[in-house]
Amino acid sequence: MIISSKHKYIFIGLPQTGSSAISKELMEFYDGESYFHKHSNIPLLIKTRPEIDIKNFFVFAVVRQPEEMVFSYYNKLLTNAYNVYTDPKYFIENGGFVRPEARKLYHKFHEKERSFEEYLEMKYKNMFYDNNLSINNKYIDGYIDFSDLNGGFKNVLGSLGIPIARDLPVYNKTKIQKRENKISDSLRNKIFGNHYIYNKRYFTNEAKKIKLNLIKKIAYWAFQQVRFRKVMKYDLSQMNNKMSIKDLENER
């Protein structure tokens, strides 16, 4: 999370949304200061730093299509970038960020050559998809579309009255394997439907296509209560984590 007391903005660095590049830029050129860990969330700020009234700040983040985010993660499993799933220095118990369940998924994934759809069916067999956009949703004042990071970043700076120093550099671009990323409508609705509807102000067109019954909506709400508590617990545990943005770049 990057905060500027001078310019009154808060940037939430959601995972896999280009947050490394924007965080670096905000700190280097736009009086931003890093708080907590790179991917910390607004509820942590509210709980631990009540002297920072977010009502006096412009809160923004980058929003990316959830299917693209999962496909990016799928490719990281394929490539094992930086050996993060096999090198103990990246394991969370050793001060890194890769959890045991992520390593278990990596090894299970490589038991056979899985397509993107097969991966989705394996990963979300007994759970809903969600990401940290949801826990921050109600606090966000504006957002940047991942498909136009540079243009969106300039628009945010302009709305804050901040002179633009330069174009946004590209950092840590994920190597994409040549794999099919198309999925069926039924699988998309099953896995991503609730996330699209809950965050429909960012995904208006997609949310309009989703039809979910009341039971699925209630189940998702219950799932979120548990997930949000887990996110807060993790954020609190990482408050004193000394890992730098450079160390975390491959998590983007």
Image (spheres, rainbow, N blue to C red):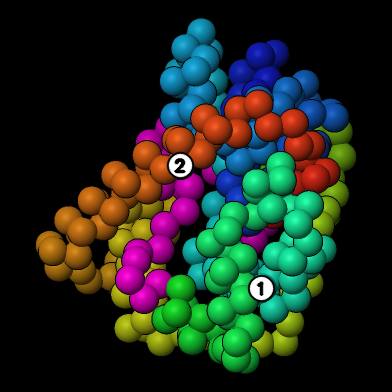
Q: Residue 184 in magenta?
A: no
Q: Which amino acid does label 2 sit on?
A: Val
Q: Is residue 39 above or below residue 109?
A: above
Residue at 48% from the left image edge and 47% from the top image edge? 132
Q: Which structural element holds mark 2?
A: helix
Q: Is residue 197 above or below residue 201?
A: below
Residue at 83% from the left image edge and 44% from the top image edge? 246
Residue 50: horizontal and vertical position, in percent? 47, 12
Residue 227: horizontal and vertical position, in percent? 37, 48
Q: Name the residue under label 2.
A: 231
Residue 118: horizontal and vertical position, in percent? 49, 86
In the rendered image, the residue lying farthest to the left is 214
Q: Work out how far the residue at label 2 is from the one at label 1, CA to CA, in angstroms.
A: 22 Å
Residue at 51% from the left image edge and 81% from the top image edge? 119
The label shown at residue 210 is: none
Bounds of the magenta segment: 124-149
Q: Which structural element holds mark 1?
A: helix
Q: Which amino acid does label 1 sit on?
A: Leu
Residue 60 visible, this orientation:
no
From the viewer's side, name the closer residue of 204 and 1: 1
Quadrant in which residue 251 is drawn: bottom right
Q: Mark 1 points at which residue?
A: 77
Q: Is residue 250 left or right of residue 40?
A: right
The local crowd at label 1, few if under 14, some if 14 to 19, many if 20 or more residues have their Cα within 10 Å, is: many
Q: Residue 136 in magenta?
A: yes
Residue at 35% from the left image edge and 64% from the top image edge? 128
